[in-house]
Image (cartoon, grey):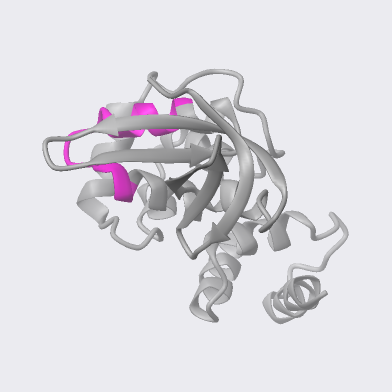
Amino acid sequence: MIASVQGRVLQRNSDSLVISVGGVGLELLATRTALEACQVGEEVFLHTRLLVREDALTLVAFASSHERDVFDALLKVSGIGTKLAVAILSHITIDNLRQAVANARPELLSRVPGVGKKTAEKILLELKDKLPTGLDILPVSDVDDLNSDLLDALTSLGFSIIEAQTAIQSLPASTPKDMQERLRLCLQYLSS
């Protein structure tokens, strides 16, 4: 198995990277956090998972070993393939995935493109008590109805779920409960 890759970034695409390792350019499917950690020309270290299929060898890059562990858990869910598992990790934080599983909140997962309500429910059912521990990467915030509506509004404006969640988590505790004010502050945060 190839557990990690260290090399210079030659190319960065919307969902993949090309890393020069020992004179060989390796193409890696990458999560959003791995992509954001890489700039063309920089030396990087990424955790990886090599998937061997009948018709392809796919090397997937992750920003952390925790992210790779969650990816492995997602692949064990029937019906979840490599690209969908990468999409889930690219659109929702690990902590919010863990919170969705712990609180049986399929609506948090169904916001990910390619994940419908039935798939979200299957993920919650099959991952219950199976997610790796030690995943406290971002502070977990309760997703109440107001924040859920705010998340829906931000994602409908074209922001990713991770961008929207980050903006919502940046709101001070003293922020009024007025939806328009909260949306304005989130948009101000995202434009800076």
Residue 27's spot in the image, x, y percent? Answer: 43, 48
Magenta-span inclusion, residue 80: yes
Does residue 23 appear to the left or right of 50 in the view shown?
right
Does residue 135 appear to the left or right of 152 in the view shown?
right
Residue 9's spot in the image, x, y percent? Answer: 61, 51
Q: Which residues are magenta?
A: 69-84
Residue 90's spot in the image, x, y percent? Answer: 49, 52
Residue 6 found in image quarter: top right
What's the residue at 50%, 53% (across, down)?
17
Viewport quadrant of the N terminus: top left
- Closer-to-camera residue (94/46): 46
Residue 125 found in image quarter: top left
Residue 178's spot in the image, x, y percent? Answer: 73, 75
Res. 143 in view: no
- Closer-to-camera residue (84/116): 84
- Closer-to-camera residue (154/60): 60
What's the residue at 35%, 44% (across, down)?
85
Magenta-span inclusion, residue 113: no
Res. 104 in view: yes
- Main structural element of the magenta stretch: helix, strand or loop? helix
Viewport quadrant of the C terminus: bottom right
- Closer-to-camera residue (191/37): 37
Which residue is situated farthest in the left direction here?
A: 54
